[in-house]
Amino acid sequence: MQDFQKQMCDFLIRRGIKNFIGVPDSTLKNFIEEATKRKKIIIATREEEAIGIATGMLLANSPTLVFMQNAGFANSLSTITSLVQLYEFPVVFLIGWRGFQKNDAPEHKKIGKIQPKLLKDLELDKKILNKNNWKTVCTWAINQTQKGNSCALIIPREFVD
Amino acid sequence: MIRKEAIELCLDEIKEQPIIAANGFISRDLFNAKDRNTNFYMIGSMGLASSIGLGVALKTPKKKIFVFDGDGNILMNLGSLTTIGSLKPKNLIHMVFDNSVHESTGSQPTNTNFVSIEKIAKACNYNHTFTVKTKNGFEKILRKIKKLKGPIMIVVKIQRSNGEKSARINHEPTEIKERFMQS
């Protein structure tokens, strides 16, 4: 079901993304595996740290994506407002959406529920990815960064393990 | 030595090389000491100066990148030391101006009263670590590190400033970013 993630990683690399910085999420496992194989990845200790490294790379003109689970997105709110948005860094966020399904583990339920509203209140433009639309959505994200905007790509967790 | 004196002292040695400065009085003192296009003033996002510096250092291996950090700042992002120590950028010089208080918010104590940041950096595989307490000692280390490979940490023990506050940075954040990227 998540096989498109490898193609998506390859597509983003070919469209100019040079670095993938983040904290692992099982929803994004295949994407992270491909980025690791391509040696373009740094695993950070926290999501805020990942965003810091990414903005440093952007200061050096190197296009960068930050990946995380939505729990980590919640950790990152202040860094998004006071670093990414304040300085207008064109970060692409890739966020795994836990708590998308009602039967997900209990710790994911609340954040999964409020995530759409958080993104909206942050005014962070987002699109939800699936195996059919990923290419269009990734092209949209690249266009956003070329205009100097940050944006978020969301992958819902559509399976329970 | 107070922070402003320490910053002025190392600017003589750093010349035009990039500096990523932590938020609060560290950025403000740097701005007042010498406003350069190669200064990145981190206004918000407390804790992340070393992470931003790491990102710049990895992507500009031919330049030496200086991080001006504070004790309160780095204590918020100790994980960063493990990432820097794992990736080992040779061109990263991480200075921590350590007064053992959060001076920008009213001088509340930090844990560096009890715990050594230098020892943590050493345990995290920084290539060289130093602690300096005097101007003379600091000048010597600044000359010495020119021949050393990073990551390097210098903990600069400073006294609290006596109520003298540097002016706020008068550049827009986007301007700070743009001029840094073009320099």
Image: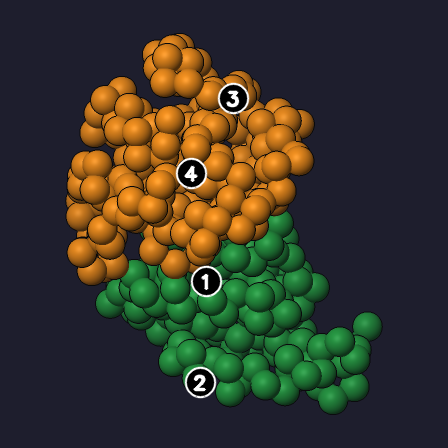
- Front-most of residues A12 and B138: B138
Residue lying furthest front in this view? B162
Q: CA distance from mark 1 to mark 4?
A: 28 Å
Q: Image quadrant for the N terminus of chain A?
A: bottom right
Q: Which residue is mark 4?
A: B160
Which chain is indicated by disc 2? A
Q: Amino acid at mark 4?
A: Arg
Check the rendered structure and report the hue given to chain A. green
Which badge, 3 or 4, is on the more N-terminal residue?
A: 3
Residue lying furthest right in this view? A161
Which chain is indicated by disc 3? B
Residue A120 tag number: 2
Which chain is indicated by disc 4? B
Q: Amino acid at mark 1?
A: Thr
Q: Which residue is mark 1?
A: A79
Q: Is residue A7 visible?
A: no
Task: Check disc 4 and report its element: helix, strand or loop.
Answer: loop
Rendered view: A61 above or below B15 = below
Residue in the image at 53% along x and 39% along y:
B100
